[in-house]
Amino acid sequence: MGFESFEQKIGYTFRDKTHIETAFTHRSYLNENRTAGREHNERLEFLGDAVLELVVTEFLFAKYPDKPEGELTAYRAALVNTQSISDAATKLGMNDYLLLSRGEARDTGRARSIILANAFEALIGALYLDAGYDVAKQFIAANIFHKTEEVVAKRLWQDAKSRFQEIAQDEQGITPTYQLIDQSGPDHDKRFVIGAYIANEKIAVGEGRSKQEAEQDAAQKALTAKGW
């Protein structure tokens, strides 16, 4: 697969093409395509995660000189969480370039969001290796910084369950509840499906690898469903 069209989209041409190829290569792809010398993207993801956190930290530190450390930490968490960076990856069309196994290629929803978020971080790592900190920073600034005003104004830095509870109590005087709908998979790879309810009304359904993650996913979808 060629990545020239993607390079045009982000305005950067890689000097070492293995960097961008590796960024888009999921571990599952190598299980079906044992190409000599090719790596999956997990090491680049590790590097990119650190660069992303530093760049966003610098940005928030300068933008909000009067905010305490706790609030800045919460803002940063909202900007770099899986949903935020997978959304950024989706807008860039990264899904079209992912190198996945046939099984992973069929996955949608939360599982695909995680893969996209990981690839986004790996791409940052690839940019850092290929061109240095400033180019990686420009990429992050172009794709992440614009979310900041909304995060602060809509209190998206609160976790979804806290936000859903606060608004539900203000709007309807009711505290939301959560019920387990289904669970599946072996112990090392559990999948939980949980519903978010206001009184007896099921507002949304979420899924995750733990009950806590599924509840957060359900709460986030419930906020969207209610237009909150």
Image (tube, grey):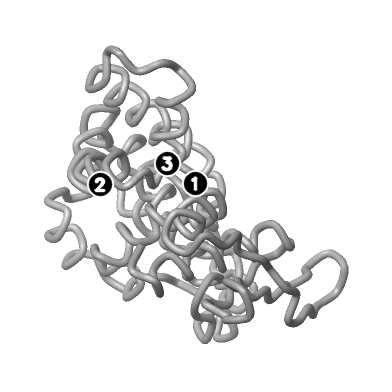
Residue beneath the point at 51% across and 56% down:
169
Task: Pick whichever of labels 2 and 3 is earlier in the sequence.
Answer: 2
Q: Distance between the residues labelled 3 and 1?
A: 23 Å
Which quadrant of the view contains residue 63?
top left
Instruction: Say what secondary structure mark 3 lies in.
Output: loop
Task: Pick whichever of labels 2 and 1 is earlier in the sequence.
Answer: 1
Say which of 8 and 140 sits in front: 140
Instruction: Say what secondary structure mark 1 lies in.
Output: helix
Check whether the beta carbons of the residues at disc 2 and disc 1 lie within 8 A of each other. Answer: no
Task: Pick whichever of labels 3 and 1 is earlier in the sequence.
Answer: 1
Which quadrant of the view contains residue 117?
bottom left
Residue 45: numbered disc: 1
Which quadrant of the view contains residue 208?
bottom right
Residue 150: numbered disc: 2
Q: Quadrant of the N terminus?
A: bottom left
- Farthest-out residue, top: 66
Residue beneath the point at 50% across and 76% down:
109
Query: Label 3: which residue?
Result: 157
The answer to whether residue 22 of the structure is visible from this angle is: no
